[in-house]
Image (tube, grey):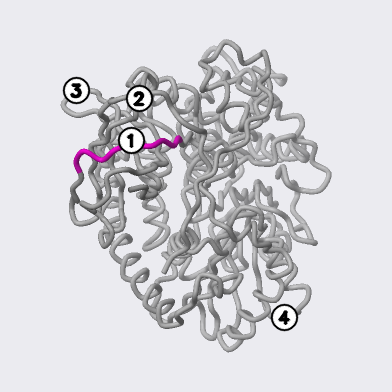
């Protein structure tokens, strides 16, 4: 049983005259995503928001200037996901290009130390001789770890983007657009974006101090934008104007042959072409391979790939990451089958599903529960929390939410109403992590649903696939599909266009027992290829169905250097 989706057209507000230079369909697409003028569509690096708006940036730069002057030993503490890996690689590479000589990194193994600058990680950094610890993509909740480092006489600079709790750590400087009192307009920066902005600010201050010379010129920090783009898309942060600039600039560098060896190796192992890379390739091809290291092994492998000095070494690391990703998929598929069997055993009717789904099995892999939560959320359109065994007596949980429900705020309310029920938690609107005591799982499940019920209206619990309306047959073409690609980058909160239309099925067959391959005919006789990945193989092919309504994305199939348009099916409704 899964929740059926309904197809619904996006409302299109009045279209601004400033958009008149674009194709009429693209005008409508932009307007429906809140674009009112050309400034929101800026993609040049010069249009990036200034770093001066970030609270704490001056104090952070001062710490780094002091560390540079004294050539202090800096330890970067990263996170074990793709944003953490790209953040670590970005800051380490950037600092070294600016003249820092003693920089290394630590990334916690999620199975030993958990997330971020914990007490244990602070102890390791201090033992390695750190004089300055810099966190990337974590730190805003590291109260105890930072307190220990400070007690040991080590300064701490926090760079993060996660939402802070009620208490901020006693760091020497904090750069986080979401900290109280920060006026930076884009609250959506990924961790790698914050690290990149710190480097921009540091380089600017070094210029004012006449630090750079002919023999040591200022580095071109744009060289780091391939990392910034990958980490931004991988972390699924909303692509507001500022983030779209970062992603676009990174893609442009990659397409022009300027990708670093590690990213080029990931592109190669994923069978993509650098000159045609899209933001979707970051999310669905490169990031999963990078994330596989942190999920199953140690993200040090992923960072080594990103930092590889040449293509042969990068390809060696990329091959290992690819193998881990294959293993990750196999583990995930097994867990998904077990979860489905569990839900079928409960035999919920579609109108009897709990407001939030909580699942736990003792042998589930901690590194894959986030992906599993996302898969189940897509199928049932409910916020989902999946737990696995953590430390002795503890469960580690990963949460994924639906639009309209802020999952971190929900966990905060549960924690407030039921003190001690959640040991620790953190995250974003759509994803979060938490730790609870194993014996309190059933209590937590009841508390979560009690609190969630206050916010989850029938409208929020209705799964809707929004489309951008019909496309005329003349738009079912490679040139128009190219226009759509160029109108991006598309991503979170700036979704890739989805269209709808009525078609007649001329051919249908199943590929690899799971993908439905179709030849469709439009209302005015145009034939077009279509493919529905992971279709319901119990319902399709269906020789009795000829007329269908299809929600689809427009794609370019590049086969043997011949390009043709194809529809990527998102949903099919049978008409007759």
Q: Identify the residue at horizontal 34%, vertical 31% (top origin).
A: 555
* Residue at mark 2: 476
Of 297 and 376, which appears nearest the observer? 376
> Picture coordinates of residue 370 (x, y %)?
48, 62
Magenta region, mostly helix, strand or loop?
strand
Front in this rendered view, residue 173 or 418: 418
Which residue is tagged 1? 567
Which span is picked out in magenta?
Answer: 499-507
Q: Earlier in the sequence, mark 3 or mark 4?
A: 4
Please name the residue that numbered disc 4 is placed on.
Answer: 420
**Callout 4 secondary element:** loop
Between disc 1 and disc 4, whose residue precedes? Answer: 4
Q: Are marks 1 and 2 in contact (CB under 8 Å)?
A: yes
Say if mark 1 contacts mark 4, CB within 8 Å.
no
Sequence-first disc among 1 and 3? 3
- The crowding category of the residue bearing disc 1, from other C-alpha atoms within 10 Å (few below 14, some 14 to 19, many at least 20), is many
157 up-or-down from 399: above or below: above
Residue at horizontal 39%, vertical 26%? Answer: 254
Where, by quadrant of the figure, is residue 519 drawn? top left
Which residue is farthest front? Answer: 576
For disc 3, the marked residue is 561
Taking 567 as reference, is 188 left or right?
A: right
Q: Disc 1 or disc 4, which is closer to the eye?
A: 1
In the image, is residue 567 above or below residue 372?
above
For marks 2 and 4, give the one nearer the viewer. Answer: 2
Residue 251, horizontal then vertical, whole percent:
44, 27
Question: Quadrant of the rendered structure where residue 422 is?
Answer: bottom right
Q: Is residue 503 magenta?
A: yes
């Amino acid at each position: 049983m899964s929740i059926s989706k309904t197809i619904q057209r996006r409302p299109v507000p009045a279209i601004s005259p400033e958009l008149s230079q674009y194709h009429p369909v693209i005008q409508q697409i932009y307007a429906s995503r809140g674009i009112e003028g050309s400034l929101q569509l800026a993609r040049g690096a010069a249009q990036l928001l200034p770093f001066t708006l970030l609270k704490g940036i001056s104090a952070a730069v001062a710490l780094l200037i002091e560390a540079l002057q004294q050539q202090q030993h800096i330890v970067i503490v990263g996170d074990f996901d793709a944003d953490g890996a790209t953040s670590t690689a970005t800051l380490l590479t950037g600092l070294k290009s600016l003249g820092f000589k003693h920089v290394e990194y630590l990334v916690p193994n999620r199975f030993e130390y958990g997330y971020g600058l914990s007490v244990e990680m602070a102890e390791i950094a201090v033992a390695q001789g750190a004089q300055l610890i810099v966190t990337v993509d974590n730190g805003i909740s590291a109260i105890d770890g930072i307190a220990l480092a400070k007690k040991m006489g080590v300064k701490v600079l926090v760079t993060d983007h996660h939402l802070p709790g009620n208490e901020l750590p006693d760091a020497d400087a904090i750069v986080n657009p979401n900290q109280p009192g920060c006026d930076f307009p884009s609250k959506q920066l990924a961790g790698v974006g914050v690290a990149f902005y710190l480097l921009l600010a540091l380089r600017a201050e070094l210029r004012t101090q006449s630090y750079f010379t002919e023999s040591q010129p200022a580095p071109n920090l744009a060289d780091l934008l391939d990392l910034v783009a990958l980490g931004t898309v991988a972390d699924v942060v909303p692509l507001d104007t500022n983030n779209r600039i970062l992603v676009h600039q990174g893609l442009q560098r990659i397409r022009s042959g300027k990708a670093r060896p590690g990213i080029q190796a990931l592109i190669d192992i994923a069978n993509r072409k650098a000159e045609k890379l899209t933001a979707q390739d970051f999310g669905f091809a490169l990031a999963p391979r990078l994330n596989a290291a942190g999920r199953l092994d140690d993200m040090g492998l992923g960072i080594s790939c990103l930092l590889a000095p040449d293509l042969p070494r990068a390809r060696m690391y990329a091959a290992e990451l690819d193998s881990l990703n294959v293993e990750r998929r196999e583990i995930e598929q097994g867990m998904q089958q077990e979860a489905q069997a569990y839900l079928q055993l409960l035999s919920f009717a579609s109108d009897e599903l709990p407001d939030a789904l909580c699942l736990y099995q003792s042998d589930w892999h901690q590194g894959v529960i986030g992906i599993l939560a996302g898969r189940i959320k897509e199928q049932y359109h409910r916020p989902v929390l999946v737990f696995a065994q953590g430390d002795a007596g503890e469960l580690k949980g990963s949460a994924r939410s639906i639009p309209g429900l802020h999952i971190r705020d929900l966990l905060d309310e549960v924690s407030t109403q039921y003190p001690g029920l959640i040991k620790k938690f953190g995250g974003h609107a759509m994803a979060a992590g938490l730790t609870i005591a194993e014996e309190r799982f059933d209590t937590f499940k009841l508390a979560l649903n009690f609190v969630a019920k206050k916010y989850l209206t029938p409208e929020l619990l209705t799964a809707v696939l929004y489309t951008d309306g019909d496309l005329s047959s003349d738009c079912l073409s490679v040139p128009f599909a190219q226009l759509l690609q160029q109108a991006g980058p598309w991503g979170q909160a700036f979704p890739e266009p989805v269209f709808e239309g009525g078609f007649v099925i001329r051919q249908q067959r199943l590929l690899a027992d799971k993908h439905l391959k179709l030849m469709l005919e439009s209302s005015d006789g145009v034939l077009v290829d279509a493919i529905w990945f992971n279709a319901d193989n119990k319902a399709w092919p269906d020789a009795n169905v000829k007329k269908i309504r299809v929600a689809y994305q427009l794609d370019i199939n590049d086969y043997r250097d011949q390009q043709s348009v194809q529809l990527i099916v998102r949903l099919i409704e049978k008409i007759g």
